[in-house]
């Protein structure tokens, strides 16, 4: 069943802004990342999504491709972001089959609720490996391709005849900005993710690359919210009450931010964090 466009994209964006551009996205079959990719493909781009589960990833790619007739969306399953060689092979294959990589999203993540007392060393390491090392591995696999793309694009803010390219987004979380129980492993991992992005912004800025972090807050209908146990009505009510905007976000609001960062409009933003959480973290994350 095709996802109605208004569910993943605001009507403010111009069709075709990503024509002939390629997006590489880890975790691309997940609830948030699949909408980021869908928005990109709807606006003219092609994409390669990466995941561990073959069936979920291939089906995810097929679903995304329905958004625009003629689009090319590849789903590469059996690729674990903890495996740098597999990731590099996937990035190189994407570039070969789709003609390069202009944009990358490091979106693969692992999360569960557990207090430090119940976290084994391997549990902590697992989340560090998926989130922090996985993001680093994604960047390392994609950066040579992004540098090639940036050479072709001016990223100056003016309307470039060739569009934009050479941009990277990391999907993070806001727990470590305020502190949250049972998320020590994720706080540590996402703090690392933020700094990987900042380092790339500094070191690759001279190549015309931009690198930014998107931090989704409580987004309705996502696996992350399920894992945080947000299902009973009282928990939902208290969660929304603690958010200045008084509601959970929509996946569309993360996809729109992604389009902004990849478009001409986002040309001077790098080394930044876009916290998209209705102001939740400003209230000390009380939810
Ligand atoms: C304590 C746990 C645990 C739990 C797993 N472990 N779940 N410890 N409490 N609930 C421990 C295991 O016992 C083991 O340690 C270690 O973690 C590794 O577990 P495995 O199952 O072997 O790891 P693996 O198969 O690699 O799976 C990784 C995973 C899994 C993170 C545990 O949940 C996963 O694959 N998740 C991917 C999808 C996901 O999490 N998406 C949510 C992203 S949302 P021992 O010592 O026993 O060997 C997000 C942001 C949310 O990140 C933001 C919302 C606002």
Image (cartoon, rainbow, N blue to C red):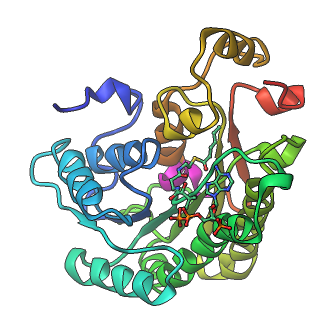
Most common SS among magenta residues? helix
* Viewer-nearest residue: 32 or 116: 116
In the displayed structure, would residue 69 be above or below residue 2? below
Identity of the residue furthest to the bottom in this view: 85
Q: Quadrant of the C terminus?
A: top right
Residue 191 in percent (x, y) is at 79, 60
In the displayed structure, would residue 63 be above or below residue 213? above
Residue shown at 39% from the left, 56% from the top = 28
Residue 236 in percent (x, y) is at 64, 15
Relative to 164, is 71 on the left or the right? left
Give residue 42's quadrant in the image: top left
Relative to 141, is 249 on the left or the right? right
Identity of the residue furthest to the left in this view: 70
Residue shown at 49% from the left, 76% from the top = 150
Relative to 116, is 170 on the left or the right? left
Residue 159 in percent (x, y) is at 45, 55
Residue shown at 24% from the left, 47% from the top = 64
Q: Is residue 15 magenta?
A: no
Q: Quadrant of the N terminus?
A: top left
Q: Quadrant of ligand 1?
A: bottom right
Which region of the structure is painted magenta?
A: 261-268
Residue shown at 32% from the left, 45% from the top = 38
Give residue 182's quadrant in the image: top right
Asked if residue 103 can be seen in this view, the reply is: yes
């Amino acid at each position: 069943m095709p996802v109605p466009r208004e569910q993943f994209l605001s009507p403010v964006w111009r069709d075709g802004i990503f024509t002939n551009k390629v997006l590489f996205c880890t975790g691309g079959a997940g609830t948030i990342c699949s909408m980021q990719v869908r928005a990109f493909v709807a606006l003219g781009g092609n994409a390669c999504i990466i995941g561990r589960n073959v069936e979920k990833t291939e089906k995810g790619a097929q679903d995304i491709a329905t958004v625009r007739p003629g689009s090319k969306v590849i789903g590469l399953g059996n690729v674990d972001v903890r495996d740098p060689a597999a990731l590099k092979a996937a990035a190189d294959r994407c570039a070969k089959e789709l003609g390069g990589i202009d944009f990358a999203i490091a979106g693969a993540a692992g999360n569960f609720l557990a207090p430090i007392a119940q976290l084994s060393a391997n549990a902590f390491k697992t989340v560090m490996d998926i989130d922090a090392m996985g993001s680093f591995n994604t960047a390392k696999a994609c950066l040579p391709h992004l540098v090639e793309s940036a050479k072709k694009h001016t990223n100056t803010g003016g309307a470039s005849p060739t569009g934009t390219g050479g941009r990277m987004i990391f999907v993070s979380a806001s727990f470590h900005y305020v502190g949250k129980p049972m998320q020590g492993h994720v706080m540590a991992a996402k703090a690392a993710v933020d700094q990987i992005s900042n380092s790339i912004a500094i070191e690759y800025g001279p190549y015309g690359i931009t690198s930014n972090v998107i931090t989704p807050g409580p987004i309705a209908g996502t696996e992350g919210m399920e894992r945080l146990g947000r299902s009973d009505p009282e928990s939902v009510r208290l969660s929304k009450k603690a958010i200045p905007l008084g509601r959970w976000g929509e996946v569309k609001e993360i996809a729109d931010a992604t389009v902004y960062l990849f478009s001409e409009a986002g040309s001077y933003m790098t080394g930044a964090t876009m916290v998209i959480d209705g102001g939740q973290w400003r209230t000390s994350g009380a939810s």
